[in-house]
Amino acid sequence: MKTIFEALNWASSYLTEAGRDRNAAEILLIDQLQLERSQLLANFHDVMSEADLLQFEKQVELHRSGVPVQYITGKEFFYGREFLVNHHVLIPRPETEEVVETVLFQANRVFSGKDCLQTVDIGTGSGAIAITLALECQRMSVSATDISKAALKMAMNNADRLGAQVDFFSGDLLEPLISRNKKADIIVSNPPYISEEEMAVLSDVVRLHEPVNALTDGADGLQFYQRFMKEIPNLISEKALVVFEIGWTQGKAVRDMFLKFFPKAEVQVKKDLNGNDRIVYAVIQHNS
């Protein structure tokens, strides 16, 4: 039998040899033993049960083969909250937390005097953006769409668990909202923006395990933004804030796209904490 320390030491080395993140071993062990990190460290010399050790070894093998840790544990933290995830949804990432920050900050600037902000999250996946906005800003009445029914099921589950009021709709991009004659003050989306070319060199952990239709448009990575530009006028009433997550090479292209379709729009490209273009946001007046 192995102590917790010995099991962790073995797993860290085993994963490092395979080019995986050695920190994954600790995450998997904490999840298996249902301990806080401080408890894990305090109990380093405890002997693991045979059942726990076998299950932990299976999880380590899964991650070594390329399965993301989050799909093994079934969860990931986003904006300080625990979201359930599975292979039907993208794993929420820190860069997308910056999208939420941008929406919250710009909403206060653009709609300072408005009591209720109709907010829509397009391609919601796990529901991370929609649920976080609903919980962080009481002024926002949040709706979310996804073309994947399996993703919507996961998003609804997360909303229930976290106590967020979000209306979910099944359908392609803005269509389920437009068909219901809904109007939006704020439109936010993290669409599939990885180009086919970039997909080929993406880490196998992402490329082979996360849902392909949530990663790429199968072309240049800009197809969904093009479709948004054509559909947005049907969803806004007077003025709208539109916030997109983008790929690090797409800032100029998406900005130019906004200005082509909405010449009078106020458009900004925002960098993430790593200094890469990550967000494009625009304030659009109807018929601008």
Image (spheres, rainbow, N blue to C red):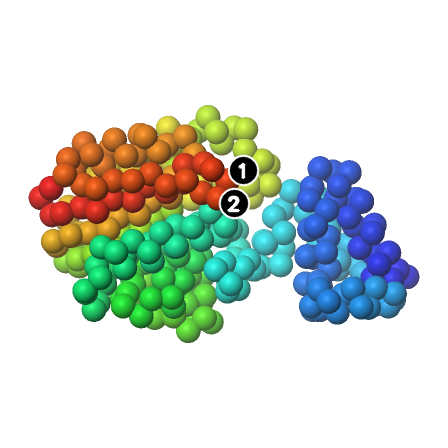
Tell me the amino acid under the disc marked 2: Glu
Q: CA distance from mark 1 to mark 2?
A: 6 Å
Give residue 269's position: percent from left, percent from top.
Answer: 33, 38
| Neighbourhood count class around disc 2 (C-alpha, 10 Å): few under 14, some 14–19, many 20 upward | many
The outermost residue toward the bottom is 163
Between 118 and 175, the one nearer to me in the picture: 118
Q: Residues within 10 Å of mark 1 (few under 14, many from 20)?
A: some
Q: Which mark is residue 231?
A: none
Residue 31 in the image, given as x and y percentages of width and height: 68, 63
For residue 210, which numbered disc appears in the image? 2
SS state under label 1: helix
Report the residue at 83% width, 64% height from top: 44
Q: Nearer the viewer, residue 139 or 228?
A: 139
Residue 207's label in the rendered image is 1
Q: Which residue sits at x=45%, y=66%? A: 158
**Residue 5 coordinates in the image, percent (x, y):** 84, 59
- Looking at the image, residue 10 lies above or below residue 200: below
Labels 1 & 2 near each other (Cβ < 8 A) = yes
**Residue positioned most to the top:** 197
Question: What quarter of the picture does the C terminus occupy?
Answer: top left
Name the outermost residue toward the right: 1
Residue 181, position in %: x, y? 14, 58
Which residue is depicted at the point 54% across and 37% down? 207
**Tag 2's secondary structure?**
loop
Classify residue 188 as left or right of residue 205.
Answer: left
Q: Is residue 146 visible?
A: no
* Left or right side of 82 for 36: right
Indicate the amino acid at tag 1. Arg
Q: Quadrant of residue 248?
A: top left
